[in-house]
Amino acid sequence: MKARGKTGRPTPRPRIAMFQLNAIYKAIFHAVLALGLAWAAVAHAQTGGLEGLTFIKKLKLARAGDVEAQVSVAIDYEQGLNQARKDPVQAARWFREAALAGNLDAQYRLSKLITKGAPGLASDATTAVKLLQDAANRGHPQAQNEMGIRLQKGDGVTLDVAAAAEMFKKAADQDYVQAEVNLGLLHVRGVGVKQDFELAFSLFSKASQSGDPWAMNNLGSMYEMGWGTALDRAKARSLYEQAAAKGNALAAENLKRLAGTTASIAPQP
């Protein structure tokens, strides 16, 4: 959802949002494949049970083999939360431990971490993609969405927009909002999938119910243009306003442009 799509002239149109590791960690991909665990059952990190615990207590649990605590400790190290020092090496260590125990969220987060690297932690794009692909194949929606983005851009993988659409759909089928938006965008453009405004409208509508500002902006654009639904500039304006209120700059631009367009076609006294 990073790219910006500009439409033609002379009629102004809304803008819809388009859009490395130390050697010790290289073995993780092969290790996780060898586990043969029911990964789908542990696809998401559940850290709610640790709420209220200090970092030291969580670290003790992590050392005792508590997978939930390992993920939570890793996140604390990665982001410098809960009085933990920011330490990407320790973050990678604990994500790795949780991933080896079968936690897909830890595997996904480790992939993200080693993609960019950090001081003391070399980047490893090849291993990162393998971990991400494996997590996606095992049903992790965030990994599926991220893999879709990579396939759409050709980022570390062969560019394949049709395969990207398949990944987005798998995540969207699990109600992952970002994937719903990304899949909707492909159907608006007709790239990798058939152009289908009605399906795109449905996807944006569903995603906007979560309050996602990009979904609201894109849904507003559909109403403004009458794509997949009846043209309704009042609804478009309302959606742009809601998205802009959430800090979406593109929605603010669309709102400003829509106001100018409406004024230019208003009947003269």
Image: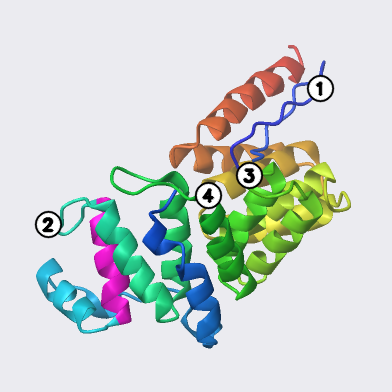
Sequence-first tag of 4 and 3? 4
Report the Cα–Cα distance between label 4 and label 1.
38 Å
Q: What element carries label 4?
A: helix
Q: Which of marks 1 and 2 is in front?
A: 2
Sequence-first tag of 4 and 1? 1
Please tell me whether the stretch drawn in magenta is mainly helix, strand or loop: helix
Report the Cα–Cα distance between label 2 and label 3.
35 Å
Residue behind mark 4: 125
Sequence-first tag of 1 and 3? 1
Q: Residue at x 56, y 31 (%)?
A: 250
Q: What element carries label 3?
A: loop
Q: Give the range drawn in magenta.
A: 67-79
Coloration of the structure image: rainbow
Q: Is residue 141 left or right of residue 221?
A: left
Residue behind mark 2: 83
Q: 38 or 241: nearer the eye?
A: 38
* Marks 4 and 3 close (CB-CB < 8 Å): no
